[in-house]
Structure formats: C-alpha cells, structure tokens
Amino acid sequence: MRRLNILTWHTHGSYLYYLSHVPHEFHVLAKPGRPPGYGGRCGPFPFGPNVHDLPAEQAREREFDCILFQEDHHWEKDQYEFLTPAQRALPRIYLEHDPPGLALPDISTFGGAAPVRGGTPGTVWPTDTRHLVDDPGTLLVHVTPFNALMWDSGRTPVRVIEHGVSIPPGVRYSGELGRGLTITNHLARRGRRMGADLFAALRSELPLDLLGMGAAEMDGLGEIDHPALPAFAARYRFLFSPVRYSSLSLATLEAMMSGMPVVALATTEMATVIEHGVSGYAVTDARQLGSCMRALLQDPGLARSLGERARRTAIDRFSIARFSADWDAALRYVTSQDATCNSTTPPA
C-alpha cells in the first residue's frame, strides 16, 4: 500500500516523534523563526526522513492525502489561511491531546448572575464541554479512553488511539539514586491542576527533583533532551506524577518502559495504568503519597519489583508497534473510499 502524505503541525514534539513511526510522510508546517506550534522538523528528536519541513506559505502548492489538526487554532484559523478550498475538503482528523477544561457559559444566560458551584442552575462541568469539532466528516482521535469519556464529541465520530512509546536500546532502570523525580513542563505556572502544590509540599520533606521546561522556577534541574531523558531518569528510585487533571504523560510511560516504579494520583487515565501496590502506587488521598515514597526509598528491592511490573504494563499496553498500527489503520480508514460522511463511529 502506498505511503500517504499527511499535513500536520508541531504541537507536542515527543508525540510528533512517536507519530513519525507510522509508515507515512508527515509534512509539518513551519514559520520563519520557528515560533511555538510552527517549528516544523525541529528540536532534539531523532526524526526519520519521513518528517518534512513545510514552510507555511508553500502549503497551498502541495498535494496531501489527509489533514491532521492538533489544536483549535489549526481548525479555526490556519486551514483558511494556509490551505485551498480543495485541500480543506480532504479527509480530516482532529487529534485531541487533552481532557476538557472548564468552559464557562455566557452569564447573560443566567440573568446576569455568575455561575455557582453545586447542583443548582448555572453549574458548569468539564463533562458538559462540547468539542470544537462538530463534523460527521472528520474523525476525532482521543489519546486516552478517559478523555473520550469526558468530552462531549457531538456528531463527530470518535476513535481512541492510546499512546505508544519507545526508549533507546539498553536503557534499564537502576534506581541507584535514592531520590524521586518529577518530569513536567512549566509546573509552577500550571499550578494545582498539575500538582505544583503537592510537589512543593512533598519536596520539603523528601528528596525530589524536577525536570522540564521552566523547572528553574521551582528550583528544578532544567531540561534534558528527549533522547537522553530515559537513561537520566532511570537512575532515580521512582517517578512521581503529581498531576490532578491532565492527559497521560509520555514521560511517565517512558519511565515505566525502563522498569521504573511510579507514584501518582489515581486520577484520569492514570487510575487504569498504575495498579496500586503492584506496579507502583496510585492513590487519591494525597496524605498517602509520602509514605509510598518512603517505602521505595527505604527498600530498593521493592522498587525494582514494582518497576518490573510497570515495565510489563508499558510493553503490553503502550508499545510503539501497536501505536503505529492503530494510527496506520485510522489514516487508511479516513482516506479510503469506505469512509463516508456520517455520524457513526468508525470501526476500531
């Protein structure tokens, strides 16, 4: 079967890298200076020859088989600025990376009164958030079953493609450092949702380090290039994910793939990934986090045992081969003659 030409954007570099394992050609929009979201083929990722820089002003001159949107402004603005009407009529996929946030309504709906909490009129919930894309002719891809459950996807057909990751050959967990590691970008500015308060409180009691963009804002270690990150992280005794509400972290899955145990909140999709006391610790009572960490710091053998089960979960559920096959099937589906514009969910 011939390789497809896919137009997309550089929204999350590590996700784009894993997406490039799918056997198709990815043309990534770039703007002068490579501002965020328009970096094209950039960054420390070992992209293969199937990832192509595409200056945005040249997009109208190219032929594609599918448009892969990844952010709201791609859908609302970029397709009209950079694409021809014929290109906009091509098969379309919208890749939604996140669960819904809190969409506040127009307060005029409530006679000028502000929305209130609880079960009274005016309450708004993430579960009531309608996705931007309301189009039976577009495939909406969610990255976790939890995200698909939470979004109101309307008439748009939905498919879940769970993450797939890989780590460099030979990288395995050692846990020699009696410390925990958190890997999160811009933790300070993202606040409670990403667990900045929990990280700060626990770090005052336990040896914890922070990696990621903006880590210096919380006296962290800074950034490590993606190819070197798994080996760097594997020396730590455990990974700590303080996230209350977000998508499943690729860095967490990469750590698990090396055999690293995870301490996390049992929220969103993480509740199905970490089996408490078997492949790590996942709790909703934040008061238990410290005791879980202390158990791993005091018992390296326990950490290795839990980490090995975490590794098996990662291999079984989040392999790059499964991820690649799932994306190939979705792209083949939307570009096939069998993909008609209707409101039914396509076969998984």
Image: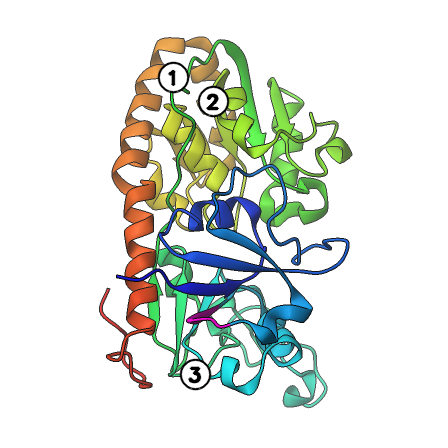
- Residue matched to label 3: 135
> For the residue marked with disc 1, what is the amino acid?
Ala
> For the residue marked with disc 2, what is the amino acid?
Phe
- Residue matched to label 2: 238
> For the residue marked with disc 3, what is the amino acid?
Asp
C-alpha distance separating marks 3 and 1: 47 Å
Crowd rating for badge 2 (residues with CA inside 10 Å; few <14, some 14–19, many 20+): many
Q: Secondary structure at mark 3?
A: loop
Task: Identify the residue at image location x=46%, y=82%.
Answer: 134
Crowd rating for badge 3 (residues with CA inside 10 Å; few <14, some 14–19, many 20+): some
> Of the residues under marks 1 and 2, which one precedes in the sequence?
2
Label drawn at residue 184: none
Q: In the image, residue 78 lies at what x, y percent?
A: 63, 74
Is the Cβ of the residue at disc 2 closer than 8 Å to that at disc 3? Answer: no
Q: Is residue 98 visible?
A: no
Is the Cβ of the residue at disc 3 closer than 8 Å to that at disc 1? Answer: no
Give the overall secondary structure of the magenta segment.
Answer: loop
Kindly report which numbered mark, 2 or 3, lies closer to the viewer in this rendering. Answer: 3
Q: For the C terminus, which image quadrant?
A: bottom left
Q: In the image, residue 341 lies at what x, y percent?
A: 33, 85
Span highlighted in magenta in the image: 63-67
- Residue matched to label 1: 303
Task: Identify the residue at image location x=33%, y=29%.
Answer: 310
Is the Cβ of the residue at disc 1 closer than 8 Å to that at disc 2? Answer: yes
C-alpha distance separating marks 1 and 2: 7 Å
Q: In the image, residue 268 lies at what x, y percent?
A: 43, 51
Q: Is residue 87 visible?
A: yes
Q: For the N terminus, which image quadrant?
A: bottom left
